[in-house]
Image (cartoon, rainbow, N blue to C red):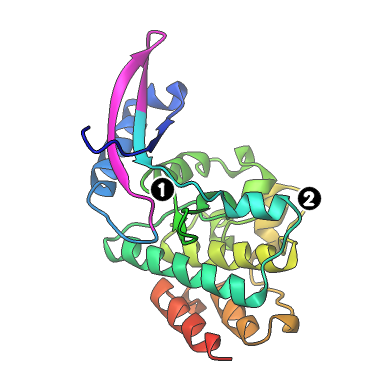
Amino acid sequence: DTTDQRVTVKVVHPDLCADPGIRARFSTALDQALTVRHTHLASVLDWGSEQWNDRDIVYVVVEHLGGGSLREIIDRGRRLSPSQGLQVGLEVCRGLAALHEVQHAHGDVRPSTIVFGTDGRARLVDIGIGEVLAQVNWADPTRVTNERAGYAAPERGQDSEIGPKGDVYSLCVTLLEATSGQVPLVGESTVATLQGRVGKLMPVSADLGPLASVLERAGRPDPADRWTAVEFGRALAQASAS
């Protein structure tokens, strides 16, 4: 590489790479991720496979982002103002819309996968990786941690296919945590969290002002009643005037 570009290399766990079916999914997803470019998606620059300690691994080369994650901001005890939450949400919606346009869900939207560049703009990371890992991890919901389930749409617990509107729900939960400090509708276990979200409207504080009604719609329990990423973004843009 003659560009002298700083990058991040992610390595998929060898246990996953040992399964030919999962490895084939990574191959398809990452080949497609190479073709997706958007300001608010962390670019996948290359991927490949190697042997490490006599085991096959898959590695992914992505652009390096130096601004830290939304998770780090929350863990430092900071909260986003409604205006800051709106801005982050709008940027992530734009990235999701580009991903959904090519018929792919992200599958793992949460504060850890929203990372800021040195320019201050939010980007979704783990494009391609997140979708495959979600398919693998959620094949048996009892093996998923309750922390991860905290960002999951209720259809995860109903043997329903997760599509782009699952990403919208996850973004809604993420923005509520970022602005309030709390993840809503969390039970004592993964199963309890998922079951407790079925048919439950998202509790949104009126303190969020015009943002409240937008998030309430994005967090509807029935995917058919939720915004698409494009609609979510438009609603956020309209709310910004207030």
Q: Give the amino acid type for the residue marked by disc 1 in the picture.
A: Glu
> What amino acid type should be assigned to the residue bearing mark 2?
Glu
Foreground: 118 or 114?
118
* Snapshot quadrant of residue 50: top left
- Asked if residue 192 is positioned above or below residue 166 in the image, the reply reads above
Tell me the CA gap for discs 1 and 2: 26 Å
The residue nearer to you, when weighing 160 against 102, is 102
Residue where numbered disc 2 is placed = 188
Q: Residue at x 37, y 37 (%)?
A: 7
> Measured along the vertical axis of the image, is residue 37 above or below residue 53?
below
Q: Is residue 6 above or below residue 219?
A: above
* Magenta span contains residue 81: no
Pointer 1 or 2: first along the chain:
1
The magenta stretch spans which residues?
41-58
Between 134 and 96, which is closer to the camera in this rendering?
96
Residue 55 at x, y percent in the picture: 38, 13
Front label number (1 vs 2)? 1
Question: Residue drawn 38% across and 25% down?
Answer: 17
